[in-house]
Image: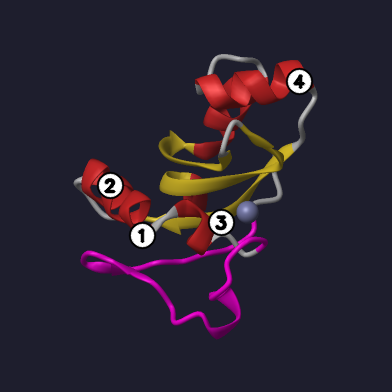
Amino acid sequence: MDDYQNVCYLIHFDEPIGNAQHYLGFAPDLQGRMKKHRTNKGAKITAIANNRGIGYRVVRVWKVPEPFYKSEKYLKGLGAADLCPHCSRYIRAFIPLSVPDEKAQGRPFSAQ
Ligand SMILES: [Zn+2]
């Protein structure tokens, strides 16, 4: 599972929570991080989704270079909805995204 270590990841919620339908984060170990999300120990928004029975899943993963916070900040600055394969108006004409110093590798994450 090395591919899922030190990654930025994008979660899409099946229903909006407030006015958010995405969560973008960084995880040293995505599998471990998803376990935390699923058990209310991750982010506040995933705990709300769990409590309301709103489904969610990882829709994109980027292997990112250090310093990780910079990559996370960079991706957040691009706008989560525009990076989501389900929601983006632009995704069909998507030009491969680059994060500083490394090409992004968007790919589905199946081991939730
Ligand atoms: Zn989405």
Q: What amino acid is labelled 1 in the image?
A: Leu
Disc 1: which residue: 78
Task: Identify the magenta region.
Answer: 86-108
Where is mark 3, residue-wise?
A: 60
Query: What kind of residue is marked 4?
Result: Arg
Q: Which mark is residue 93?
A: none
How packed mark 3 is, by other alpha carbons closer than 10 Å (few <14, some 14-19, many 20 or more), is many
Q: Mark 4 points at which residue?
A: 52
Task: Say if 6 sits above or below 65 in the image.
Answer: above
CB of mark 2 within 8 Å of CB of mark 4?
no
Q: How far apart are marks 4 and 3 (CA)?
A: 23 Å
What is the secondary structure assignment of the residue under circle 1?
helix
SS for tag 3? strand
Where is residue 26? Give x, y as percent. 40, 40
User: Dividing the picture into quarters, in which one does residue 27 lie?
Assistant: top left
Q: Which of marks 1 and 2 is nearer the N terminus?
A: 2
Examine the structure image and report whether residue 106 is included in the region drawn in magenta.
yes
**x and y, in percent, of residue 1 in the image:** 55, 46
- Mark 2 or mark 4, whichever is nearer to me: 4
Query: Which residue is label 2 attached to?
Result: 73
Q: Which of marks 2 and 4 is nearer the N terminus?
A: 4
Q: Residues within 10 Å of mark 4 (few under 14, many from 20)?
A: few
Query: What secondary structure characterizes most of the magenta part?
Result: loop
